[in-house]
Image: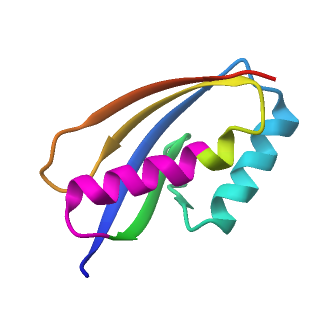
């Protein structure tokens, strides 16, 4: 199965600083690597059948890490030459 690099740009709205710090630590534990030059930019290597599958896997993992805290998450996800995915998720307490 090939490995794809998935790029995720994020915006965290209405989130406590402590929660954001916790999410950042947990994302690192789940295979996401922060891009240090751009705040809110993440990269993940995904083993998948194709680029769409890789994006879906990365989104699912990212959202599962974040859903513990109440805030609004906005994502822009890119992998290879496939279509860019935009998502907005509102997590309730």
Q: Is residue 71 magenta?
A: no
Above or below residue 53? Residue 84 is: above
Above or below residue 64? Residue 46 is: below
Relative to 79, 62 lies left or right? right
Residue farthest to the right? 18
Q: Residue at x 77, y 39 (%)?
A: 68
Q: Main secondary structure of the magenta part?
A: helix
Relative to 49, 57 lies left or right? right
Q: Residue at x 64, y 56 (%)?
A: 27
Q: Residue at x 41, y 56 (%)?
A: 57
| Residues in magenta, as a range | 48-63
Residue 91 appears anywhere in the view: yes
Q: How many marks?
A: 0
Tell me the quarter of the image containing the C terminus.
top right
Residue 37 appears anywhere in the view: no
Residue farthest to the left? 81
Residue 67 x/y as whole percent: 69, 38
Residue 63 x/y as whole percent: 57, 42
Q: Nearer the viewer, residue 53 or 29?
A: 53
Q: Is residue 62 magenta?
A: yes
Q: Image quadrant of residue 6? A: bottom left
């Amino acid at each position: 199965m090939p490995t794809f690099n998935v790029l995720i740009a994020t915006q965290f709205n209405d989130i406590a600083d402590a929660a954001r710090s916790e999410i950042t630590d947990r994302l690192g534990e789940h295979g996401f690597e922060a891009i240090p030059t751009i705040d809110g930019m993440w990269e993940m290597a995904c083993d998948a059948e194709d680029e769409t599958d890789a994006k879906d896997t990365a989104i699912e993992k990212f959202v599962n890490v974040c859903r513990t805290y109440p805030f609004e998450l906005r994502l822009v996800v890119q992998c290879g030459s496939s279509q860019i995915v935009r998502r907005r998720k509102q997590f309730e307490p």
